[in-house]
Amino acid sequence: MERPPLGPAGIVVDLAAIRANTRLLRATAGVSLIAVVKADGYGHGMVESALAAQSGGAEWLATATIEEALALRAAGVEGPVLCWITTPTSDYAAAADAGIDVSAYSGEELDEMAAALQGRAEPARIQLKVDTGLSRGGAPRAAWDELFTRAQQGESAGLWRVSGIWSHFACADEPGHPANDRQERAFRDALALAEERGLRPELRHLANSAAAILRPSARFDAVRCGIALYGLDPAPGEATGIGLEPAMTVTAPLLMVKDLAPGDGVSYGHRWVAEQPTTVGLVPVGYGDGIPRHASRPGAPDAAATVGIDGKPRPIRGTVCMDQVVVDLEGDRPPVGSEVVVLGPPSAGGPTAQDWAEACGTINYEIVTRIGGRMSRRYVDSETGADA
Ligand SMILES: *Cc1c(COP(=O)(O)O)cnc(C)c1O
């Protein structure tokens, strides 16, 4: 019998899905879209995701770090880019040269920027981040006045132009959470104070994916969408079914099929033991590829993470290893070389990132962002048929 060729496990990203999701979000929000491509585009590839989002109508791109933003430029990506994580060693002059908007959180940071930007012919572009209740980055309310006053002084001195003021929600995925109203009110207070201090930012933004979809009052001049661009629901269970398409599919070949007798233990620690004659299959993906070891849930076989083979869910048995997992074929004997859908859109016949998240007690963001490791990533375009 001829065996089908066995390729290694790999990631396929459909750029048409990112483009379509971008169009949908842009149309839903009705304001500028800032496409968030940090952390290698949530595991989908930063540069390719950025270009796909731009071709779907995203006016802006955003990354966490200056280094990520500079990497976009080094790859030839043009257009407005915002970033928000800096350190005292950040190269503010390089960011300014590359036309990147850097976010400032404090007066000290403005001092560092001023020192780095002294003597430049053109003003840099900066955005101010205010903390409205996430208690993470950004100036706390008590420091808003100082941040705005010093930012305005730097603007008057020609060091920079304050192009934006922004903040970030803590509970946007729970639309009924009282923190959302409080944060939006606080953000409006910040904008009013900034105006009193003489700032006229063109880009005021607060909403992430969940708020962009669920909270029209928070859209302001732009929304910052990450997870929804990649087609995953930012607020599972909150009826955000606007027709997003998951862009990532992970597949692997079935490497081996074997029979176990009652009492045979599976994988490290024998944390799963066959109670009856069982057929299992070997799939070459593991935590070295970003498959969470948390998917090994001894004692909770009904909640086990699954992969899809022939469109059927096949539960993972025993501990997820670095390079492989063992799955229960439940009496079937699919041929070696069969395609295993490790993760993908529902139409792919395997689990979704959301299914993995629920099996592992995490969120879909973490599942796709950690996928990678040694797996290769391939890009396709289901709209044009291109296979890059
Ligand atoms: C990651 C991030 C986003 C994107 O959030 P999503 O929920 O993925 O849309 C927006 N703003 C900030 C500050 C972020 O860190």
Image: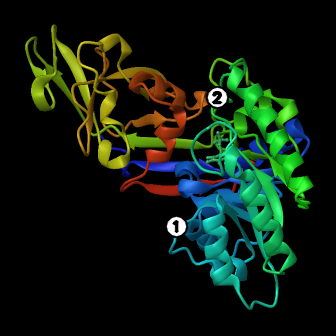
Say left or right for 261 vs 341.
Answer: left
Up-down: is 290 above or below 364? below
The N terminus is located in which quarter?
A: top left
Which quarter holds ligand 1? top right
Residue 171 marker: 2
Q: Earlier in the sequence, mark 2 or mark 1?
A: 1
Q: Is mark 1 within 8 Å of ligand 1?
A: no
Which of 249/255 is in front?
A: 249
Does the image show residue 224?
Answer: yes
Q: Is residue 80 visible?
A: no
Coordinates of residue 129 in the picture (x, y in percent): 70, 53
Query: Whole-percent x and y of residue 226?
Result: 66, 45
Q: Is residue 315 left or right of residue 151?
A: left
Q: Nearer the viewer, residue 131 or 265?
A: 131
Q: Give residue 106's position: percent from left, percent from top.
A: 64, 60
Between disc 2 and disc 1, the foreground one is 1
**Which residue type does callout 2 highlight?**
Cys
Q: Which residue is mark 1?
A: 87
